[in-house]
Image (cartoon, grey):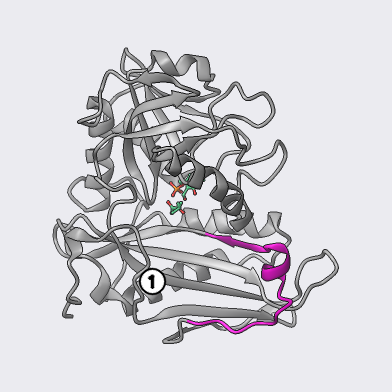
Amino acid sequence: MEKKDIDWSNLGFGYHKTDKRYVSNYVNGAWDNGALTDDDTITMSECAGVLQYAQTCFEGLKAYTTEDGRIVTFRPDLNAARMYDSAKRLEMPAFPKERFVEAVEQVVKANAAYVPPYGSGATLYIRPYMFGISPVIGVKPAEDYQFRMFTTPVGPYFKGGAKPITIKVSDFDRAAPNGTGHIKAGLNYAMSLHAIVTAHQEGFDENMYLDPKTRTKVEETGGANFLFVTKDGKVVTPKSGSILPSITRRSLVYVAKEYLGLEAEEREVYFDEVKDFAECGLCGTAAVISPVGKIVDHGKEICFPSGMEEMGEITKKLYETLTGIQMGRIEAPEGWVHEIKL
Ligand code: PLP
Ligand code: COI
């Protein structure tokens, strides 16, 4: 298979249309068989549930080319499970988990020419999503739904790749106590748009959201969980019922303990503690691990000892081990790497 003529090393995190996408419709109370299509457009009622009341959720995962030339995805079963939970919370019919993984296989295989080559620094981002498509005017769930999955080749989420970023403590909340912060609902991201535009206008790369109830504890950013390293080399990551359970973060906690022999704990993290950490990073599918050099809280700066030039030492070890597993350089735990047979 010949790869597309794309300048892989200079890709940003953007949408680039690929050849095929997967579509399945939920009509009369059942999912149809689903199929790949060339059509990248969607036609729906002006009154569709997604348009009126934002009934939609999504996922994000990546396909990688390994050192020995295979195409693999990373823990797609966990994305299937999280999307199942998101759908349930939004009163949508969940898409069956095994069919989710089959759709990943189909869509990556059909777009294999867009999976960036090993060593290019780029990957194929896979975006599954579903939404209420039938008309809804009283506030209630739609009757019919569409599940889709497209792919797009991407580079680093933050410009500059591994260079540390600067974030601000947001005055806005991303989630509500007992709300939807723990699922991947489109509405959470709509909520964050004003905050991210404001942060960018002020010269910051991202926001740190605090817990919406007390505003004393660290939650997450708009698109990634936090990971901190203490001065004595322990990995700490915030625990909260209103953050997205990041698959990258869960994997990194395992990597820290089982591959690097570090202590790692998931616990509540008070903002007051942050100034005492040695390293800070953002972790997620898109972010991978993006180092944070500085956090600004209403003019007060917290500068991590790791600085603004390089990833912290432990953050770097975590990054190398995780990407090593994903690209087939390091042996993966059972079930983490899902090969796409061409
Ligand atoms: N937190 C938010 C709000 C996200 O959008 C994402 C991205 O999916 C993550 C965390 C990271 O999750 P994952 O590692 O599963 O991609
Ligand atoms: C992902 O990491 O897959 C996400 O969905 C985050 C998003 C902000 C791009």
Tell me: residue 209, above or below residue 179.
above
Q: Quadrant of residue 250?
A: top left
Residue 331 visible in this rendered orientation of the protein: no
Query: Is 50 contained in the magenta span?
Result: yes
Asked whether mark 1 lies closer than 8 Å to ligand 2, one says no
Residue 202 on image: x %, y %: 44, 37
Residue 96 on image: x %, y %: 58, 67
Q: Quadrant of the C terminus?
A: bottom left
Residue 209 on image: x %, y %: 54, 34
Q: Residue at x 48, y 23 (%)?
A: 297
Residue 183 visible in this rendered orientation of the protein: yes
Q: Quadrant of residue 140?
A: bottom right
Q: Residue at x 61, y 44 (%)?
A: 182
- Among all residues in the image, which is located at the extreme front? 201
From which residue to which does the magenta span run?
41-58
Side of 44 relative to 163 (left or right) = right
Residue indicated by mark 1: 105
Q: Quadrant of the N terminus?
A: bottom left
Side of 250 relative to 110 (left or right) = right
Q: Residue at x 43, y 72 (%)?
A: 150
Residue 256 on image: x %, y %: 33, 30
Along the line of sight, which residue is nearer the eye, 261 or 298?
298
Q: Secondary structure at mark 1?
A: helix
Amino acid identity at mark 1: Glu
Q: Residue at x 63, y 55 (%)?
A: 187
Tell me: residue 191, above or below residue 280.
below
Along the line of sight, which residue is nearer the eye, 61 or 168?
168
